[in-house]
Amino acid sequence: MGISDNDYVNFSQDHELDYHLRKVSKRQTDANRKELKQMGEELKKLSGKTRLLHNEFHPYVDKNKFRLE
């Protein structure tokens, strides 16, 4: 069985970004969602990927949660 679209982070969906914020106990604000989008771009560049899986993105967010309110 292959990877589903649901396994990828959709950075245009606030509820998906809020999910990652809740997982690191951070506030669900526009500023935090904007920062997550920036983190996503950074990780994509570092990994050479165009899309990120939730299980790839979460450890990066957890490591950089100091950047969030």
Image (spheres, rainbow, N blue to C red):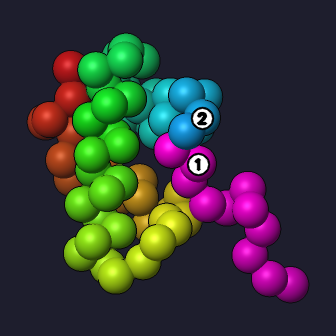
Residue that mark 2 sits on: 13
Q: Residue furthest left?
A: 66
Q: Is residue 9 rendered magenta in the image?
A: yes
Location of the N terminus by quadrant is bottom right
The residue carrying mark 1 is 10
Judge whether residue 41 can be spotted in this image: yes
Which residue sits at x=38%, y=29%?
33
Which quadrant of the view contains residue 15? top right
Q: At which x and y percent is residue 14?
A: 55, 28
Amino acid type at circle 1 is Asn
Q: Quadrant of residue 47?
A: bottom left
Magenta region, residue range: 1-11
In x, y percent, where is residue 68? Answer: 21, 29
Q: Is 11 left or right of 48, judged from the image as shown? A: right
Q: Is residue 14 magenta?
A: no
Q: Residue at x 36, y 43 (%)?
A: 37
Q: Secondary structure at mark 1?
A: loop
Q: Amino acid at mark 2?
A: Gln
Where, by quadrant of the figure, is residue 29 drawn?
top left
Q: Is residue 62 visible?
A: no
Q: Position of residue 51 (x, y in %)?
A: 51, 68
What element does badge 2 sit on? loop
Q: Is label 2 in contact with label 1 (beta carbons under 8 Å)? A: yes
Q: How many marks?
A: 2
Q: Locate the C terminus by quadrant.
A: top left
Specify whether 36 is left or right of 63. right
Q: Main secondary structure of the magenta part?
A: loop
Q: Please, is residue 35 above or below residue 44 in the view?
A: above
Percent coordinates x, y for residue 38 in the rendering: 27, 46
Question: What residue sits 21% from the left and 53% below the top?
Answer: 63
